[in-house]
Image: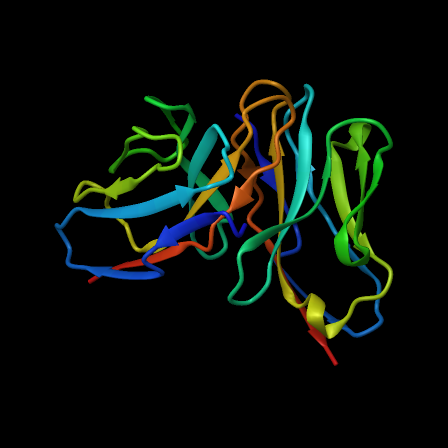
């Protein structure tokens, strides 16, 4: 079965620091990849997604992610974090045209200190 | 996001009682999903439906049941057979065609006392 690993469970950064959150998945076929964010007290929101094409994708609020097929990875990056980026971040995958339901990682709680 | 309604936001039930969580959408999406979120475990799929009158079990369907009588609605019943029902429940919708982005509702936090 598909699995998604997020190795950083809790990350604490100061404002203006750079961010990279790791995401690895196990499925070897065609995948669609997503990063979602859950701000305190808010809905789960889509940050960015990769379906095909340029492996470097840009999302909202200055986030980007790079799909590296050979490493089964889809890491999330932001050059300079802000206090408002404090949230929980989830990587998710679904298996191409087959199963559309998402398999989620366990999440990374990001705390940005002013 | 704005087109998915989950009610109530907080729900309390006694152990042994069945409870039904509501999910309604006005996005005209064919697919609907129920996920359960527990601290440190991410979201796990309970049930999903890609079309009216059809639904499939997800990874943790035991102790849950669903129906899909209308395109707009996908209620989830948490039965007394669910051993650990206290959790945050999220409903999502998607287009069910090609690569699909899912949109999530605000969630219902169920506490079983």
Side of A47 relative to A57 (left or right)? left
| Residue in view at x 65 percent, y 26 percent | B99
Q: Is residue A81 left or right of residue A107?
A: right
Which of the 4 image quadrants contains residue A100?
A: top right
- Residue found 47% across the figure and 29% down from its top: B31
The residue depicted at 61 percent of the width and 18 percent of the height is A97
Residue extending farthest to the left is: B16
* The furthest residue to the bottom: A114
Apparent side of residue A72 relative to residue B25 in the rendered image (left or right) = right
Applied colour scheme = rainbow
Residue A113 percent coordinates (x, y): 72, 78
Query: Which residue is more in the foreground, B53 or A63?
Result: B53
| A58 and B81: which is toward the camera | A58
Question: Where residue A78 sits in the image (x, y, percent)?
Answer: 82, 57
Query: Residue B89: x and y, percent?
Result: 39, 50
The x and y percentages for residue B70 are: 34, 30
Say which quadrant the C terminus of chain B sits in: bottom left
A71, A101: nearer the viewer: A101
- Residue B59 image-quadrant placement: top left
Residue at image location 37% in from the left, 55% down from the top: B108
Is A1 rendered above or below residue A59? above
């Amino acid at each position: 079965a598909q699995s998604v690993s997020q190795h950083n469970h809790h990350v604490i950064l100061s404002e203006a620091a750079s961010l990279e959150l790791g995401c690895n998945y196990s499925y070897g076929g065609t995948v669609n990849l997503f990063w979602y964010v859950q701000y305190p007290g808010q809905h789960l929101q889509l940050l960015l997604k990769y379906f095909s094409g340029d492996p470097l994708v840009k999302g909202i609020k200055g986030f980007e992610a790079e799909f590296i097929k050979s490493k089964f990875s889809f890491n999330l990056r932001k050059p300079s974090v802000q206090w408002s980026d404090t949230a929980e971040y989830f990587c998710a995958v679904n298996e191409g045209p087959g199963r559309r339901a998402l398999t989620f990682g366990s999440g990374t709680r990001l705390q940005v200190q002013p | 996001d704005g087109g998915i309604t989950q009610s109530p936001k907080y729900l309390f039930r006694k152990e042994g009682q069945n409870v039904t969580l509501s999910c309604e959408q006005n996005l005209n999406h064919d697919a609907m999903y129920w996920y359960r979120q527990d601290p440190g475990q991410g979201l796990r799929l309970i049930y999903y439906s890609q079309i009216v009158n059809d639904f499939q079990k997800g990874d943790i369907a035991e102790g849950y049941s669903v129906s899909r009588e209308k395109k707009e609605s996908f209620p989830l019943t948490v039965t007394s057979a669910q051993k650990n029902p206290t959790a945050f429940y999220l409903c999502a919708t998607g287009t069910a065609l090609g690569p699909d982005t899912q949109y999530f509702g605000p969630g219902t936090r169920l506490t079983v006392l």
